[in-house]
Amino acid sequence: MQIRKEREIRMNETSEKIELEDLGYSDFFEDCRKANPDISLIPARIVAEHKGSYVLRNEKYEFSAKVTGKMMFTASARRDYPAVGDWVLVSFPDDNNAAVHEILPRRSVLKRKSLTKPDAQIIASNIDVAFIVQSPDRDFSLNRMERYFSIAESGNIKPVIVLNKTDLISREQLESIRNDMSDRFPRASIFRTSVATREGIEELSGFIRKGHTYCFVGSSGVGKSSLINTFLGKDIIKTGEISIQRNRGRHMTTHRQLFVLKNGGLVIDNPGMREIGLIDAGAGIENVFEDISAFSKNCQFSDCTHIHEPGCAVLLAVREGNLDGKRYANFLKLIRENKHHSMSMLEMREKDRRFGRMVKQFKKHKKKQERIR
């Protein structure tokens, strides 16, 4: 894979020279790069995001950059800005500055409902596997895991379960929880880990492959950062104790960052997210609840909502005990939430389009009036 090398400029030279492929670059991104007519732009990956700037890395350097004014002007939503994990095309206007011109198409994306706007917030991109971390001593919930699974699968990301801090419960409790997870997620890989006892650490580390990107998601305090520190072999990420009064973890990770592990794997640490809203996740929900999708094929009506319709095969499965009632209730909850947020996003985009048309019409009218004068 041939790319144009950047000229020598003043940047932080990395201690170890690596290939772009080791950072997750592939023929997919190279083909997208070639589609840009400006051959002077070079690819780099976003490894951290700060207010107003980004930290990027390529095979030789780690450096800071800002998006161009043109990119800011054409952006219509937060999704149009870079996110950790993105591959972007950059230039170097002078020896001290770098500029991001374009985001290369994303192969996968982890997103949630924005906390402040009716739009999607991109958590990270170009991820191969999402480690969904839960701790049995905290707010362990199979329903929440279904939520994370739906979000991961809707973004073309493979979800994997990590039950962490296994040293805090008995073997009997651990087996009971694992059986419950296996029943609810029969096709999922499940790892049981403990940083304190080293249980499962070697197995999970062996699952991580060089040049592949992984992210750790879960509530604050479940031990995501401790796991990553263990794989890094040093305490780079701050970790906090659980609050005894509230039994809630402190949000020690304040921003997303991509790390290169000793074995060559790439991991993204995310701030703890107790609430993670669904948006545009219909395909993911259908994949996670494939048993319900299978039952629905026998419903009397093709547009059955599985709530009150006669001849509903899903309701029949619940009544006959072939479908767990709690799983069915969570399915309906996620469907309603996703539909509500997705409709809000579509309405917002339509509002933006109407406003854009109004501005264009105003400018056109103004130019016409100026010509008359």
Image: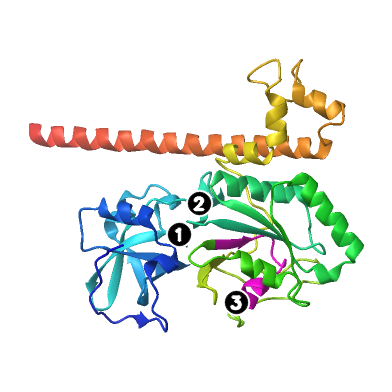
Q: Secondary structure at mark 2?
A: strand
The residue that disc 1 covers is 83
Instruction: Tell me how far mark 1 sits from mark 2, CA to CA.
Output: 10 Å
Q: How is the image coloured?
A: rainbow
| Residue nearest the viewer, comparing 329 with 244 | 329
Q: Residue at point 67% right, 41% down?
A: 288
- In screen coordinates, is 125 left or right of 319? left
| Residue nearest the viewer, comparing 116 with 165 | 165
Amino acid type, mark 2: Val
- In screen coordinates, is 227 left or right of 259? right
Question: Dot 3: few (<14), some (14–19), or many (≥20) neighbours within 10 Å?
Answer: some
Q: Which residues are magenta?
A: 214-232
**Quadrant location of the C terminus?**
top left
Residue 231 sits inside the magenta stretch: yes
Q: How many numbered callouts?
A: 3
The residue that disc 3 covers is 237
Q: Residue 225 shows which numbered tag?
A: none
| Residue nearest the viewer, comparing 203 with 56 | 203
Amino acid type, mark 3: Ile
Q: Nearer the viewer, mark 1 or mark 2?
A: 2
Q: Upstream in the sequence, badge 3 or badge 1?
A: 1
The residue that disc 2 covers is 109
Is residue 338 among the parts visible in the rendering?
yes
